[in-house]
Image: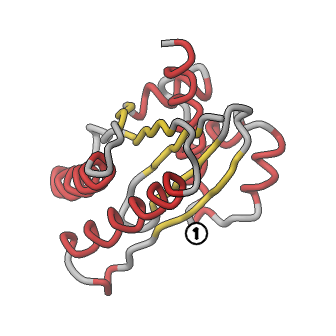
Amino acid sequence: MTYYIGIDQSYRSSGIIITNDQSEIVKQEIVSTLKDYGSYFRRAKIASESIASIVNTLDEYTDEDIHIGIEGLAHGIRSHTLQNLAGLQFMIANAIEDMGFKVAVYTPSTLKKFATGSGKGSKEDMFTALPGKVQKMFESIPKSHGREDLVDAYWISRKVKDVVNNG
């Protein structure tokens, strides 16, 4: 069996979804770093170590292939926010690559097009495009507690699988 990990990074709540060959969710996790944890540097360190730990735990308990993807940065966001998110993305990718994995980066528009058929799809469109069973699983999670991050992470894991299997 092969595992596909999707990571949607943010300082408030990073979504991590691990799916298998049948696109079933094996694990879902939200990694939060609150403002009172300290500076963006400190929060990026905490988030990257937490996410790397999730990947490491899977790696320790399986001999199967693991493929990982992360959402790239949206270019329409403010420069200060973009700089902080770039730092977070670097820390996460670096921590995972230090473990011997490659991390594929997919632009938000690529993921939206993959999930909804349109590169301009909304967060609601991404949710609506989920398989019914996954929608039901996520609908109990409030948006304020990372539902949209999990939705994005799910589609990232599916995109990783698509690229691995179809090139």
Question: What residue type is disc 1 on?
Answer: His
Q: In this view of the protein, can residue 115 be seen by the observer?
A: yes
The answer to whether 73 is drawn above or below residue 139 in the figure is: above
Q: Residue at x 66, y 35 (%)?
A: 1
Question: Residue most toward the bottom?
Answer: 36
Q: Secondary structure at mark 1?
A: helix
Which of the 4 image quarters holds residue 32?
bottom left
User: Along the horizontal axis of the image, is 85 left or right of 83?
Assistant: right
Nearest the camera: 155 or 4?
Answer: 4
Instruction: Residue 149: tell me if it is visible.
Output: no
**Residue 81 % position (x, y):** 23, 57
Where is mark 1, residue-wise?
145
Residue at the front extreme? Answer: 63
100 or 166, which lies in front?
A: 100
Q: Residue at x 30, y 41 (%)?
A: 73
Above/below status of 124 relative to 2: below
Q: Residues within 10 Å of mark 1 (few under 14, many from 20)?
A: few
**Residue under the point 39% across and 54% down:** 9
Q: Position of residue 89 (x, y in %)?
A: 28, 50
Residue 69 point in image, percent of width and height: 43, 38
